[in-house]
Image: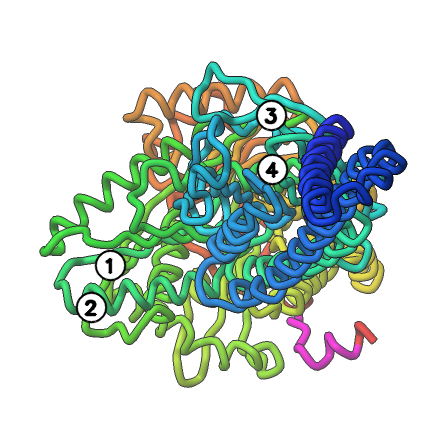
Amino acid sequence: MPLQHTNKVDLSKRFVTEGLLAGVCLMLLLVWVEHLGLFLFGAGMQHWVTTFSLPLWLLPGLAGLLLGLLVYAAREANRIRGGHARLAGFLLHMHKHLDAEGPFAQRMQHVLQDLCAQSKSIECARAILISRTEFSVVANRQKPYAQEPDAAGCGEAAWSVVSVSGGDGTDVRDEKHSACCESLWAYLSTEEAAAGQILVTGVCQSYSANPTQTLPHGHCFIPLLSHGVVEGALAMETEAHVQLHAVTREVLGMLGAALGGELAQERLRQQMHRLAHFDLLTGLLNRTQLLERLQQAFVATQSSRQWGAALLLDLDHFNPINDLYGYAAGDFFLRSMGQRFGVGLRKRDTVARYGGDEFVIVLEDLGLTQEAALRAVERVVQKLRLLASDLVKLPGGDASVSVSMGIALFPTPDQAGAEEILRQADIALHRSKESGRDGVSIFTAAMATDLRRRRAYDQPLRGALARNEFSLAMQAKCNAQGRIQGAEVLLRWEHPGLGPVAPDIFIPLAEESGAILEIGEWVLRQSCILLAQTAHLSQQYALSVNVSPRQLRQPGFASIVRNILEETGAPAPRLTLEVTEGQFLSRIDNVVQVLEEVRALGVRISIDDFGTGYSCLFYLQKLPLDELKIDRSFVQSAPKDANHAVLIDAILSITSQLGLDVVAEGVETRAQLEFLAARGCTRFQGFYFGQPQPVLEFLTALHSHNGDRQHETEMGLLAFRPLRADKADVRRQ
């Protein structure tokens, strides 16, 4: 038998017992022969019996011992051959389970059950298998340990899975097996396991039908290898000491190699499944699996008549976390957000990572009416916003974000499937971001119409600069007395067929397409030409030019500004570049470096729309600023809103201490002007002082308004010649 439970004491007792029994049988046979001889031959036999009596009586004992040894050896050889044959047959039978259908853990369970079922030859009371494929199987033979195997009918005993976890989703644990499992896990990390050596242990305490009963057990630990890599280990528990024959070790090694190869293939299948269906960073469903789940939900709603919803979530201001704490902390933050978004959702709901810092939640069975669905979505949205706002503990500190959401309800007549639903949710998300972030928008048909209208300008925008369709407009910056002290340069686009196009339509399109780089450089060059060609006028004024985020991130932006100043001869101190708060949220160190290089040229830097974005005193301290523009939303409500009034007072106080100039945007009434002037604001911009005007009209109004001589005004008008796009390209070369 492969696993022998017979020690030396048992062997001696068995040898003596069987030998003496054979000797007694021979002595009785000789006595019977002696009496038969005396009866047949009489006195002639008497002399022979007297001479050979002692050797004849000793011969049975010796012959009995020899016969007993031969019988014992023959029986043990037969047991060993039978055990090897059964184990070899088990190896052949094992592949039937491995090739069967069903969860992998269940197939491994059947293999271990068959292994334990060889009770009469293997004497395996329990088998435990653990592997790197994140599941473990324990099969136990159900029988009273106090009874002998044959008496208990072990060959017909029932089998059960004591512990199966991982592979098929079940998680049933038996604490009575924890000690053995811990020993098996420890064995996996040993050099013996890596070398493929089978480990045999002695007596240990283990599972018993009677918790108070202690029985000796032995363990055989078999490493499961595949190409030299330990894929797992198999423990076979017996009810006595363990002895392994050389042939048995070879067969068990074959068993370990077969199971190791199967575990390696399963691990590879699991890895491929994770790569195909799950996001590697968060463990959530990836985009491919999301589309499949959403399509299933969409089809289900059409038959159940229940409403569903797709929520597209975007983490606001996530990039500063990467900048401040590092990318490892950013990855941890994303994982934490993914786990939070799954809290409180129903089992049939789906959470997936859509890409970057975007997540998608699919809600099903929200109600039979759209109103009920909206109420259900509102409850989920409130819960998600609370979860996202909680601080996440990072290695360098705590961080939190807000969430912008776009929601698309389904099914609707204009939806064809999952792709269309996500497109609608994305449109709604963009509307949320345009509204100032940390908002929620539900898709409507009007949003799609607006998007199509915007996209209609996409193609004409690409050639607008070459066709000289852009022009500049100026909006005055005045003091409290209304005297013009400068202006902001604004871009206007008039298409021959589409007519005037609003900046809030074509500027975002230019940002998305990258055309803003060429357009922005053209605006900057035109503004510098205007400054250079009007430098002889007695009235000196400054011009402010808006710089887009893509321009600021453009490699060599400071060199571009320097080249334009040198080519046009514009005075750098009279040029101000306006940047928005949102441009500081991504790679702030790079932004600071670029602004410092530009400021070193003598150009002034202004922060635009202060108060609407991620306003932070850190930016005012770190950024190289000369000017701050208070957003119009504060200016227009400050006279009536006490909270906004307090904020404006704080902004004016801080900027005064930092030595920054302040411009109040959006001044439209005299009440607003007087309110701001009373608090120390000295420069203003808004419709109260005039609408934006074309350049030539603005120059005329400038000198007329400020009382300059007429001939100087005419000279200024004649001096400005807008540079056409084709000439600008030549100059850049």
What is the spatial separation of the Cα atoms under label 2 and label 4, in whole angstroms?
37 Å
- Reading the chain from its start, which is encountered first: label 3 or label 1? 3
Tell me if residue 322 is in the magenta stretch: no
Looking at the rendered structure, the secondary structure element under dot 3 is helix
Q: Amino acid at mark 2?
A: Thr
Give residue 646's position: percent from left, percent from top.
41, 19
Looking at the rendered structure, which numbered label has been put on residue 409?
1
Question: Pointer 3 and pointer 1: residues touching (CB < 8 Å)?
Answer: no
Which stretch appears magenta?
A: 721-730
- Residue 276, located in which quarter of the rendered image? bottom right
Query: How far is disc 3 from disc 1 in space, using C-alphas?
Result: 53 Å
Find disc 3 in the rendering and name its residue. 179
| Predominant SS of the magenta segment | helix
The residue singled out by tag 4 in the image is 332
Mark sitting earlier along the chain (4/1): 4
Residue 729 among those drawn in magenta: yes
Where residue 26 appears, as percent x and y from the top left, is 72, 41
Kind of residue indicated by mark 4: Phe
Front tag of 3 and 1:
3
**Most extreme residue toward the top, as rendered?**
212
Amino acid of disc 3: Ala
Residue 412 is labelled as 2
- At x 73%, y 46%, the residue is 37
Q: Nearer the viewer, mark 2 or mark 3?
A: 3
Color style of the picture: rainbow
State which quarter of the image contains the C terminus.
bottom right
